[in-house]
Amino acid sequence: MLTLRYVVVDVFTDRPLAGNPLAVFTDARGLSQDTMQALACELNLSETTFVLPAEAGGTARVRIFTPRAEIPFAGHPTLGTALVLGTPLEGRTLTLELPVGKVPVVLEREGARVVGGWFSRPAPPPLAFAQGEALLAALGLRQTASPLTVYDNGMRHALVHLATHAEVAELQPDLEAVSRVPVDTVDVVAWDGEEALLRVFAPAHGVYEDPATGSAAAPVFRHLVEHAGLDPRSTLPIRQGEHLRRPSLIDVRQSSDSTDASPQIEVGGRGVVVARGEFRLPGVQGR
């Protein structure tokens, strides 16, 4: 019998049963991709991560699965896995090896307890996108506050900027139509000059709406700097998930060591471990 232990952490929140839940399998040695995918489907969270020994000098290698597929990068799995792995470590920094490369995470502690952290990635580049009209129709929108833009940070984010928080909150998309648009997520955001309100739809990955999306934070930050006058020296708070009863808070800022030629974006938040468990799988091959 194969026994697999996992931890559930609520990410981008400082209280249990909010934010975005993540399951972290802390020792995935010997598991096949099919078994990892089946476990992610069984748990049916936005993402599930599997921790493996490092291969390139990092702290650990991490694989990320949605209920439907393995993906190269996502924000709340990066932060949540770092919070789980960082608890028994003494240092403040660890590095996760993901398919997109090494991702450094700086941990925040209260005493011995890890309560949050920041990860950094290069600012995502914009991509050409020819399906803007189809996406707006799927969202039930006629106009946006700035040009619809797709950004690539390992995941393709279609960024839809609206004028008011109310427009974002009242959105009722046709998710079947959204799933046919060739992007990974559709990120709908409004900024009131102080904080952003974000909703993220990823039906192609089996996630109809996500309560907290760390990978969307850098595209949102870059877009609002370019198109809405956001001060690039500021820290932007992003609210998400409230109408899903999973209120989340994501902070995003430009790294202090960024350059014009190589801008880096830092995404931060808190997290809370809420459960520990194990799978007992008779007949499943493993380590």
Image (cartoon, rainbow, N blue to C red):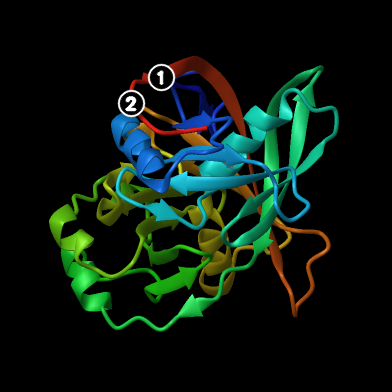
Residue 118 lies, in percent from the top left, at: 69, 44
Amino acid type, callout 2? Gly
Is there a contact, CB below 8 Å, between mark 2 and mark 1? yes
Residue drawn at x 69%, y 38% is: 117
Q: Secondary structure at mark 1?
A: loop
Report crowding for label 2: few under 14, some 14 to 19, many 20 or more residues within 10 A (C-alpha). few
Q: Is residue 15 visible?
A: no
Q: Mark 2 or mark 1: name the one nearer the start of the chain.
A: 1
Residue 111: quarter of image = top right
Q: In this rendering, is residue 12 above or below 265?
A: above
Which residue lies at the image location 79% right of the left edge and 28% below the top edge? 89
Label 1 neighbour load within 10 Å: few <14, some 14-19, many 20+: few
Q: Residue at x 39, y 37 (%)?
A: 241
Residue 127 located left or right of residue 62: left
Residue 94 in sight:
yes
Q: Is residue 183 above or below residue 18?
A: below
Query: What amino acid type should be assigned to the residue bearing mark 1?
Result: Met
Front residue (pair 1, 44): 1
Q: Number of labelled discs?
A: 2
* Disc sitting over residue 127 in the figure: none
Q: Residue under circle 1?
A: 1
The span from disc 2 to disc 1 (Cα, nearest Å) is 6 Å
Q: Which residue is mark 2?
A: 283
Q: Residue at x 41, y 74 (%)?
A: 149
Question: For numbered disc 2, what is the local secondary structure?
Answer: loop
**Image quadrant in which the N terminus is located:** top left
Residue 48 placed where, x, y %? Answer: 44, 38
Give how far across and how far down residue 160 sits, in percent.
Answer: 36, 64
* Residue 57 spot, x, y in % from top left: 78, 52
